[in-house]
Image (tube, rainbow, N blue to C red):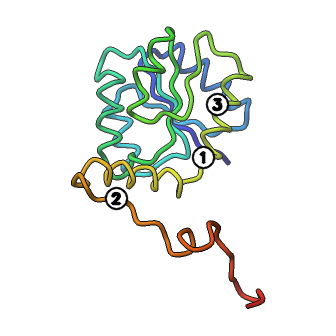
Amino acid sequence: MKRVLFVNDEPNTADELSMMLQDLGYRVEQAATGAEALAKIRRDPPQVVLLDMDMPTFGSWNFLERCRRDPAGESLPIVLLASTTDAGPAAKRFRPVACVMKPVSPFSLNDALKKARSANPVQRVSAIISGIWQARRPSGIHRAAPSSERTSGRFRFRGPGSER
């Protein structure tokens, strides 16, 4: 079953959206604070984190920053729940997969979670490594193209059973 960690500090909203998620076929774990969510991520990372951006206690921004610095959460797909359109663009540096506007419809929530679940973990880790390399690379050092790019301009697959 698909597992979602839902981070929300309002019990009524958390219960409503948890029921909606269960109806969509998700197993839901709840965290009322960012600290509780980080502990759950470290203990057993979920497939997707659904984060309410309107949390005052251990705020959403603080959670995003700490989650992305933590090895257990740096590549987790995160879907934001926002009441204003400002949250999505401001959160881009934390690499959310999607942003769902409140009030939440089951269709928009399901689409965002499908997108998050289909995000390839290898691509997420590759993007993180690339970002670290870009930040730490001394100026003047450039990526060398693989020899197959330099010679033919395209790659050739040579796997088991392929002709030589």
**Relative to 24, is 31 on the left or the right?**
left
First of labels 3, 2 by sequence position: 3
Residue 112 disc label: 3
129 vs 52, nearest the viewer:
129
Measured in 3D between alpha carbons, the distance from the residue under mark 3 to the one under mark 2, in whole angstroms, is: 36 Å
Relative image position of residue 95 (x, y in whole percent): 45, 36
Q: Hey, which quadrant is residue 107 in on the image?
A: top right
**Relative to 8, is 1 on the left or the right?**
right
Amino acid at circle 1:
Ala
Amino acid at circle 3:
Ala
What residue does disc 1 label? 119
Label 3 SS: helix
Label 1 SS: loop
Disc 3 vs disc 1: Cβ atoms closer than 8 Å? no
Quadrant of the rendering where the C terminus is positioned: bottom right
Q: Measuring 72% from the left and 87% from the top, which residue is drawn there?
A: 160
Relative image position of residue 76 (x, y in whole percent): 47, 45
Circle 1: is it few (<14), some (14-19), or many (20+) Cα within 10 Å?
A: some
What residue does disc 2 label? 142
Amino acid at circle 2:
His
